Amino acid sequence: KHTNFESETIVLLGFLHGLPPDVTRISELTAEMKIRLALREEISFQFVPRNLSVKESERTNSRYNFKAIAVEGDGKFAPELREAFFGLGNPKEEQFTWPISGKALYTPMFKTTAWPLESILKMAKHHVFFVQQMDQ
């Protein structure tokens, strides 16, 4: 898989809720987010508009497919990257400071105690609804 940085393993960390994947300027988003996150130089990430899927239930193999801006990074820095993205703040407030990335809400793609599968699925569905409303 192509990355814009050196990495041993690339992992999907999550997606950016609220940013339309087909019209967001990825280079500008990345530049602003690098300033906003202020990570150590060796920690890199990338945004990729692509199709994603979330399991609809623990009991079935059915999946909900949707398009979003995926957040990917080097596997060895995944915990630090996730924590940095979780610390982005409230989009209702941040959008005034960060014109490109401020409206985004980071949503993880893997379930945890804080983020059960049902919550991730609801966020994916809401993201699709939200982006469709912006298109109208």
Image (cartoon, rainbow, N blue to C red):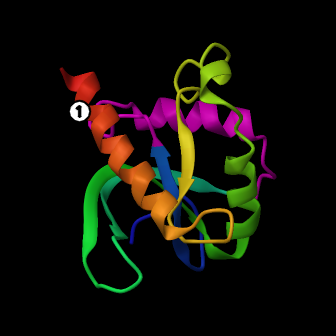
As drawn, 28 above or below 50: above
The residue lying toward the viewer, choosing from 131 and 8, is 131
Q: Position of residue 129 (x, y in %)?
A: 29, 38
Q: Residue furthest top?
A: 96
**Bounds of the magenta segment:** 17-43
Q: Residue 50 appears in which quarter of the rendering?
A: bottom left
| Residue 48 seen from this side | no
Residue topped by disc 1: 132
Q: Position of residue 87 (x, y in %)?
A: 75, 44
Q: Residue furthest left?
A: 136
Please name the amino acid that badge 1 sits on: Gln
Q: Is residue 15 left or right of residue 33?
A: left
For mark 1, give the secondary structure: helix
The part of the image, by quadrant, that contains residue 116 is bottom right
Residue 36 belongs to the span the image colors magenta: yes
Say above or below: 82 vs 123: below
In the rendered structure, the answer to whether residue 9 lies left or right of residue 89 reads left
Drawn side of residue 15 relative to residue 87, left or right: left
The crowding category of the residue bearing disc 1, from other C-alpha atoms within 10 Å (few below 14, some 14 to 19, many at least 20), is few
Figure quadrant of the C terminus = top left
As displayed, is residue 59 above or below residue 69? Answer: below
Residue at 59% x, 34% y is 31
Most foreground residue, 55 or 80: 55
Residue at point 55%, 30% (across, down):
101
